[in-house]
Amino acid sequence: KGIVNISTFLAPILVIGGVFFGLYSIFTSYEPVFLIFDALRKSFMWSAVIYASYNIITAVSVLSSMGEMIESRKAARRAGLISGLCLCLLGLCFIIPMYLNLDIVSGFSLPMLGLAKSYGPVLEIIYMVILFAAIFTTAVSSGFAVIEWLSEKLPLNKLTIKIIVTVAGILLA
């Protein structure tokens, strides 16, 4: 329940923040929007496939442990459709500004953070908070999945496993 509450609170902030930065970058770009199609012919697809694969691996472990929380097939389909549409919108709001501003983002390992930095310190800090929230939700979700898996395998109570996983996560981070 706790992980659902955290995600319920942070997910709208992440989507709204991502859409805001993407649209802001698109509308303040100096390049025509349709030049993006020239850039898409490069290795865009392989990067997208690798990135999506990495995230799906994490999602499978989290979603499989949350199966009992799903009320019905209809609710699962609706949640999947809405989530997919939000991710598509968010993806477009990230990829278009990055291609419109390749000269700015090409030297950054976190391109959207580099783009936010180019708009000034206030937007950079706001984007850093959004990025931290995204990392936090991923860490909490992954930790939840690991704790559920370990609680089935080890003869320890859940509180002990939570403490071990949290300490190990902090030490290995």
Image (tube, helix red, strand yellow):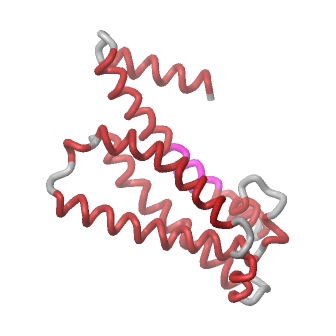
Q: Quadrant of residue 122?
A: bottom right
Residues rendered magenta in the picture: 128-137
Residue 132 location, x and y as percent?
58, 48
Q: Confirm whether the magenta stretch covers residue 78.
A: no
Depth check: 19 or 81 in front? 81
**Left or right placement of residue 151 versus residue 35 in this view:** left
Residue 150 location, x and y as percent?
36, 21
Residue furthest to the left in view is 72
Give the residue drawn at x 69%, y 83%. Answer: 37
Q: Confirm whether the magenta stretch covers residue 133.
A: yes
Q: Quadrant of residue 46?
A: bottom right
Residue 137 location, x and y as percent?
47, 46
Q: Quadrant of the N terminus?
A: top left
Say how many tags the image has: 0
Give the residue drawn at x 84%, y 71%. Answer: 103
Give the residue drawn at x 76%, y 61%. Answer: 114
**Left or right placement of residue 40 versus residue 136 in this view:** right
Give the residue drawn at x 65%, y 54%. Answer: 128
**Left or right placement of residue 60 versus residue 109 in this view:** left
Residue furthest to the top in view is 155
98 vs 12: above or below = below
Main SS of the magenta part reads helix
Q: Quadrant of the C terminus?
A: top right
Residue 97 location, x and y as percent?
68, 75
129 vs 44: above or below = above
**Left or right placement of residue 81 versus residue 134 in this view:** left
27 vs 25: above or below = below
